[in-house]
Amino acid sequence: MAVMGTRMLRKEDPKLLTGEAKYVDDIHAAGELWMGMVRSTHANARIDSVDVSAALEQPGVVAAYTGADLAEGYWIAPLPCAWPVTPDMLNPPHFPVAVENARYVGDIVAVVLADSRYGANDAIEHVVVMYEDLPAVTTVEVAASGDALAHPDLGTNKAYSWALDPDPDAVQAALDDSVHRVSARFVQQRLIPSAMEPRGVLAIPSPHGGDITLYSSTQVPHILKVMVAATTGIPEHSIRVIAPSVGGGFGAKLNVNADEILAVALANKLKRPIRWTESRSEAAMSTTQGRGQVQYIEIGADADGKLTAIKAHIQADLGAYMQLITPGTPLLGSFLYTGVYACPAFGFVCDGYFTNLTPTDAYRGAGRPEASYAIERGMDLLAAEVGVNPEEIRRRNYAVGGEAFENWESPSGLVFDSGNYRPNLDKALELADIAELRAEQTRRREAGDSVQLGIGMCTYVEICGLAPSRALGDLGYAAGGWEHATVRMLPTGMIEVVSGSTPHGQGHETSWAMIVADKMGIDPAHVTVLHSDTALSPLGLDTYGSRSLAVGGVAIAMATDKLIEKAKAIVAHQLEASPDDIVLDEGNLMVAGSPDTATPIQSVGFAAFSAHDLPEGMEPNLQEQVSFDPPNFAFPFGTHVAVVEVDTNTGGVDLIDYIAVDDCGNQVNPLIVEGQVHGGIVQGVAQALWECAEYDDHGTPLNPSLMDYLVPSPTEVPSMTVDSTVTPSTTNPLGVKGVGEAGTIGSAAAAINAVVDALSPYGISDIEMPASPQRLWRLINAAQEGAST
Amino acid sequence: MQVGMTVNGEAHEADAEPRTLLVHHIREAVGLTGTNIGCDTSSCGACTIHIDGEPVKSCTMLAVQANGADITTIEGMAADDGTLHPMQQAFMENHGLQCGYCTPGMVMAATSLLQENPSPTEAEVRQGLEGNLCRCTGYHNIVKAVLAAAEGE
Ligand code: FES
Ligand code: FES
């Protein structure tokens, strides 16, 4: 039964559609206590005193702690950062509760435990904290100037400087010799990831047994387990981490958070279950944010517009502390500042700075949307400079002339597994009907229509399938990049797959069942997938970086192959044939050419379980496992076209159409692929047009709620046209690449290119994100005034 | 205070502090956790339920205000034999959900939408669901699902 490539409906849907699924906040334990966090209201301050005595008087309050109370005996190490990107990177110790200094609005300064959700929230109002204000660093550019210090004791705001810049002089010389040069400064504003399920934790101790179970709304239960052990000192084998249903993550649940460590440490001490769920308004402080960069890019080209050099310099806003992969996040983009293009000279430098704001970390795409934005905005600038249209400048510069390739060494040194860029671009432009759009644009321009049309494109590439462990080691990352899978056939012939990937909306239960069913020729309904619980799935590296299929799915496919081989050996033994002569056909094992010997593969489960008649020396049971460490990354690519209307009277932008042609290699389930692309596109467009975590000059968040932070609603976006080309990956036997981040990586640049295109008659060549009506209105007005003077 | 209500056809009586939000009451006192909470500003719609047949964000009401009300939550939508409600079925067939967190609220809001307007246009579906946020799907397949459910009815 061919299952791969079909639009199979998702196995996980019925329980999600009926309210049966359990998220962390749905799970309760007898005797549980609610944590309430007292958070600093000052971005940078000495903590003079913390008085919890009045809170302790409140009804239902069981305990209250200051940072000093918890300094001894609750943890053995600060919150972890797994990615020291340089040997001399600065990393000030970051404890779950601040002791002497608060370094951002939201830094926890005291914790209250009460017997109810409302009781804990009430009690925190009764904690009195006295602060002595210090100057706050509220933008990365202030941080770089050194005018104020985020951590005065460090003496500098610069945490590190990291370069991928083997020959800076050659890059400069190539730029200087270029016929055409463009340069730009782009701001990647901070974003609040806003998974619809707020983060939450529930830690349940077993006072006599000595173990502890942590439920967390996390993407990374396996990483969390190791880190809880390393941070609290509780032996690793006593810790079980469960990520139940998780309501979206987008990178913001790829972390080890103060609340998780607090819940475990307090549950362990008090011998009572401890829980907490962030409120939405708290999430802007209690959960990491995304992006936060100022980018400078310089691009050189010859007379024909062919790239001669690209130089990128990034200032990264790390926030107040290093969270799990804060320092490495901007560097994930370093290899993509040359995009899908051939370019003889390339240099990249990233300076990471501390600010007194919520820490930044991974957010859908993590470093790669930023890179894609810089190069794809840059290519449009170059097109304007050279005097050709955006698709032409791209065609002239595509790797390998836009022809199909395998294993191409990109300017950054990474080897792209496979690509075929021209047909992908052509398909997108055809679907968009670019000629018709341009004709309409011309018509409106000539008529002086107050609503102008803009067409923007982006031809992106991303790095997926994180990651070859060796490559991560070279980048200074602490862990590996493999993934683990176990496939077992139960005595009744049903299949259990155990995966180390941890889904939070991606539909792994469906896709993994499809991979196994396809290989065995059985009904996918006979396959169940176990995941997200370190007791069921002890080995795994979880879900982020579009890695689940290209690493985890491949591990499952390989384990299935091994299992089939063992089943063949058992059947060969029963039929007194050679295993080499056994073939698998539509779920039956048989001697090649002898259909009368057909034995359903699912019957072998019982033979392996009963073990009455196995080949000499063979172990009972049908269970195989594989840890797959990919030999290379995978490099999906695609073309996105955004079509916008800009009302030149109001500055309002309306996204009226969106066309995406993505190439993620072979597809397991196109239904799921399209869903990932849809969601990603809207998240990227949201950065371009609406979203921005704003702060005042004191570092106070101005829009931490869903009332003020503009997560798009259904009326803001159109239905989209999503299609694909298929260029199989050479990195893994399934030929798959990954698609979780693709939409986000292509869409912000496409949307801004479209807005700029609409306004180019006004001489407007760039617009800072988000392209809000206020911002556009000012630009348009200034351009009109300039024209009339 | 004693608060009584009918939830998914069953009478339920429990004590509630006057300030308890209806959504917390349903989730914690009634024990039906399918109704989700996504915000604290009545912005996201994850908590949408039906009260006396009308869609309501259950975080905008106190439990005591629902005294005597007839409430339907997502748990009450499928038939007793497990058959999904046509709207749930349409969401499944059109991949209108990913993480599923917004889904109960979306399904409840969409069902009410079709009651009001049995054959909406795409724009009317989008407008009708404006108070419900989803971070995963980009709304494309949610809108498709609601239009498909309307077709089917
Ligand atoms: S929880 Fe009710 S609207 Fe968000
Ligand atoms: S499906 Fe995840 S928020 Fe809608």
Image (cartoon, coloured by chain):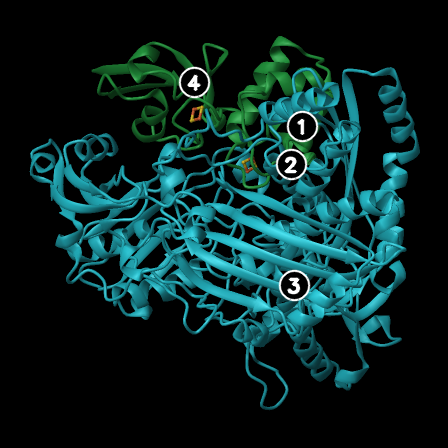
Chain colours: A cyan, B green
- A499, above or below A751, in the image: below
Q: Do callouts 3 and 2 point to residues on the same chain?
A: yes
Of residues B60 and A192, the one drawn nearer to the viewer in this rendering: A192
- Secondary structure of the residue carrying numbered label 1: loop
Find disc 4 in the rendering and name its residue. B9
Q: Tell me, yes or no, if residue A1 can be seen here.
A: no
- Secondary structure of the residue carrying numbered label 3: helix
Question: Percent from the top left, x then y, of residue B7?
Answer: 40, 19
Of residues B21 and A350, the one drawn nearer to the viewer in this rendering: A350
Find disc 2 in the rendering and name its residue. A685
- Outermost residue toward the bottom in this view: A616
Residues at marks 1 and 3, CA–CA distance in whole angstroms? 31 Å
- A536, above or below A290, in the image: below
Label 1 amino acid? Val
Q: Chain of mark 4?
A: B
Question: Percent from the top left, x then y, of residue B21?
Answer: 32, 21
Q: Give the number of the mark in front: 1 or 2.
A: 2
Q: Give the number of the mark in front: 2 or 4.
A: 2
Find disc 1 in the rendering and name its residue. A717
Residues at marks 4 and 1, CA–CA distance in whole angstroms? 38 Å
Lower position in the chain sequence, tag 1 or tag 3: 3
Lower position in the chain sequence, tag 1 or tag 2: 2
Label 3 amino acid? Phe
Asked if labels 2 and 1 touch by Cβ distance under 8 angstroms, the answer is yes
- Numbered badge on residue A335: 3
